[in-house]
Image: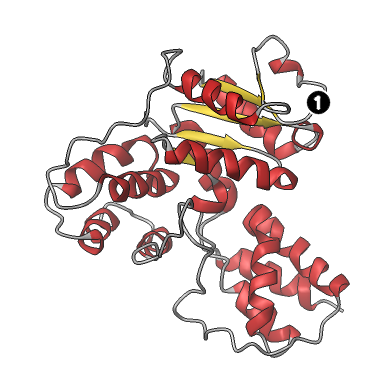
Amino acid sequence: MTTTYFLSYARADAVQALRLADDLIAAGVSVWVDQYDIRPSQHWDRAVETAVRACAGMIVILSPRSVASPNVADEVSVAIDDGKTLIPVLIETCVLPLRMTRMQFIDASRDYDAALQRCLAAIQGGRPVAPPQPEAAPPSPLPAETLRDAERRLTGIMGPIAGVLVRQAAAGASDEASLYAALARAIPNPLDRESFLGWVGETRGPGKVVTARAPPPDLPPPTGASLAISDTELQSIARALTKHLGPIAGQLVNREKAGAESREALCARLAARIADARDRAAFLKEVTAG
């Protein structure tokens, strides 16, 4: 079991959800967020389920969109069945899901700052909220933030054992690259291993865990070319990609279209994001049909 909290939310509520996640992370809480912690080459459903089962608890963003979301319902059900601690945070009035009607929720719809403090107190077991204290220096020159990021990312692939692996690898790591190289050796799946190593060197902006994802190294960088393709076609491609990569598909389509010279090139770039060969073939067949 890790000390990481899983963030469950509807994609339409991403602005409010990611604001809460960033504020909790800034206060020293380890939060697993799909947009931060799933690389494009990972299978979205598998990464989410692994993270839910490995987390210490779940923060659920409640709104009319999230209570209607099958993905949020699935995540909550798995968490409840596994006996996880749930922290419901209400951002907009809605009818609570049946399995959550008797739970106490935090109302963030009126006073966000007070809700943030209550959320921190709930995570800390009801103890008064104190400013985050600096962690004891690990037995390596690596910052504690680097170790926390590595554990959160590895948890999406390896599950609860990630924390143990990070602590063991940190003892002999001199920098972030050597830490990730040591951890990668424990990942049996070559695609997951390559995906995990892709985190090394990604820069972080103020107040954010990571920046937007960069294209994989085997793809050419965006050229800035203008792609002549309608919004309807882009939406159709995004729907097809969502079946294989989940909600992140829309973001990938919007980013990759900037570097694609044609519809075929765009589809090829997106297909490269799908790890499974059969899923990749199915995607290409769907987007090229007709």
Q: Tell me residue 202's x, y (percent).
A: 40, 65
Which residue in the protein does label 1 denote?
Answer: 93
Colouring of the image: secondary structure
Q: Is residue 50 visible?
A: no
Coordinates of residue 130 in the picture (x, y in percent) = 38, 23
* Residue 166 appears in the rendering: yes
Please tell me which residue is depicted at 56% across the width and 48% down the height of the picture. 34
- Residue 123 vs residue 95: left or right? left
Question: In this orientation, which residue lies closer to the viewer: 116 or 68?
Answer: 116
Q: Is residue 56 above or below residue 243?
A: above
**Which secondary structure lies at badge 1?**
loop
Quadrant of the rendered image containing residue 94: top right
Quadrant of the rendered image containing residue 75: top right
Pick the quarter of the image with the N terminus. Answer: top left
User: For the view shown, which residue lies furthest in the top direction?
Assistant: 102
Q: Is residue 170 above or below residue 175?
A: above
- Residue 206 placement, left or right of 97: left
Tell whether 249 sits left or right of 33: right
The number of numbered badges drawn on the structure is 1
Residue at 60% in and 89% down: 223
Residue 58, percent across and down?
54, 28
Q: Badge 1: how crowded within 10 Å, few (<14), some, or many (20+)?
A: few
Front residue of 182 and 244: 182
Picture layout, residue 218 above or below residue 155: below
Relative to 160, say whether 173 is above or below: below
Say left or right for 149 vs 278: left
Residue 80's x, y, as percent? 58, 20
> In the image, what residue occupies the spot 40% across and 39% down?
159
Q: Residue type at mark 1?
A: Thr
